[in-house]
Image (cartoon, helix red, strand yellow):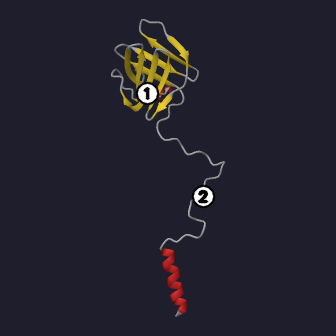
C-alpha cells in the first residue's frame, strides 16, 4: 500500500509541473547558432521604380541609384543603402529621397503587378509610382 501511495504522490507532483533543481530557465542557444530570420520586408538587392503622369523611373542597384525623367538629364548617385523604418525603406541622397512600402501596386497603364508602392521626392516635387525587383518584372508581360 505504501508503494501505491508513493507512486501516486510522485505522479501528482509530476503533473504539477515541478522542474528539477537548476532547470528554471531555458538554456541559451549556442554562441555559433544562426541568428533568427529577420521579420518584415526584404529591401536588399535591386529594384526598378516606375511612375506615370509625369513619367519617371529609378533603378536601384548595389552601387548606384539612377533617376530618369522625361525631358531631363538622368541623375545618378552612389547608393547609400536604405534606412528601414518598420515596413518602409528610405534611400536619401541630397535633395532626393526614395521611399518603398510593400503592397500590391499597379502602374495604371499595363497589366503588370508590382510588389511595392514607390515614391520619389525630388526637391519640392513628389512623384508616386510602383516598384519591383527586375527579375519579377521580367517574368511578367511586357507593357
2 or 1: tag closer to the N-terminus: 2
Residue 129: x and y, percent?
Answer: 38, 22
Residue 54: x and y, percent?
Answer: 36, 13
Q: Is residue 133 left or right of residue 109?
A: right
Residue 75: x and y, percent?
Answer: 50, 11
Residue that lies at the very extreme toward the bottom in this rendered image: 1
Q: Is residue 15 left or right of residue 110?
A: right
Q: Quadrant of residue 140?
A: top left
- SS for dot 1: strand
Q: Is residue 15 above or below residue 51?
A: below
Q: Is residue 25 above or below residue 40?
A: below
Q: Residue at x 53, y 13 (%)?
A: 76
**Residues at marks 2 and 1, CA–CA distance in whole angstroms:** 39 Å
Q: Quadrant of residue 106?
A: top left
Q: Residue at x 45, y 22 (%)?
A: 98
Disc 2: which residue: 27
Q: Nearer the viewer, mark 2 or mark 1?
A: 2
Q: Is residue 44 left or right of residue 132?
A: right
Q: Residue at x 36, y 23 (%)?
A: 107
Which quarter of the figure is the C terminus placed in? top left
Crowd around label 2: few <14 · some 14–19 · many ≥20 (10 Å): few
Residue 100, label in figure: 1
Residue 127: x and y, percent?
Answer: 38, 17
Crowd around label 1: few <14 · some 14–19 · many ≥20 (10 Å): many
Residue 40, label in figure: none
Amino acid at each position: 500500500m505504501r508503494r501505491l501511495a508513493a507512486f501516486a504522490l510522485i505522479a501528482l507532483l509530476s503533473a504539477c509541473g515541478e522542474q528539477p533543481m537548476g532547470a528554471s530557465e531555458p538554456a541559451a542557444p549556442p554562441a555559433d547558432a544562426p541568428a533568427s530570420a529577420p521579420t518584415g520586408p526584404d529591401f536588399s538587392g535591386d529594384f526598378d521604380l516606375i511612375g506615370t503622369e509625369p513619367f519617371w523611373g529609378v533603378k536601384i542597384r548595389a552601387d548606384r541609384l539612377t533617376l530618369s525623367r522625361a525631358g531631363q538629364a538622368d541623375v545618378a548617385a552612389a547608393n547609400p543603402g536604405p534606412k528601414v523604418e518598420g515596413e518602409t525603406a528610405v534611400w536619401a541622397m541630397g535633395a532626393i529621397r526614395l521611399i518603398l512600402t510593400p503592397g500590391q501596386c499597379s502602374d495604371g497603364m499595363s497589366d503588370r503587378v508590382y510588389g511595392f508602392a514607390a515614391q520619389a521626392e525630388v526637391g519640392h516635387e513628389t512623384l508616386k509610382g510602383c516598384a519591383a525587383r527586375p527579375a519579377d518584372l521580367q517574368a511578367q508581360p511586357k507593357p
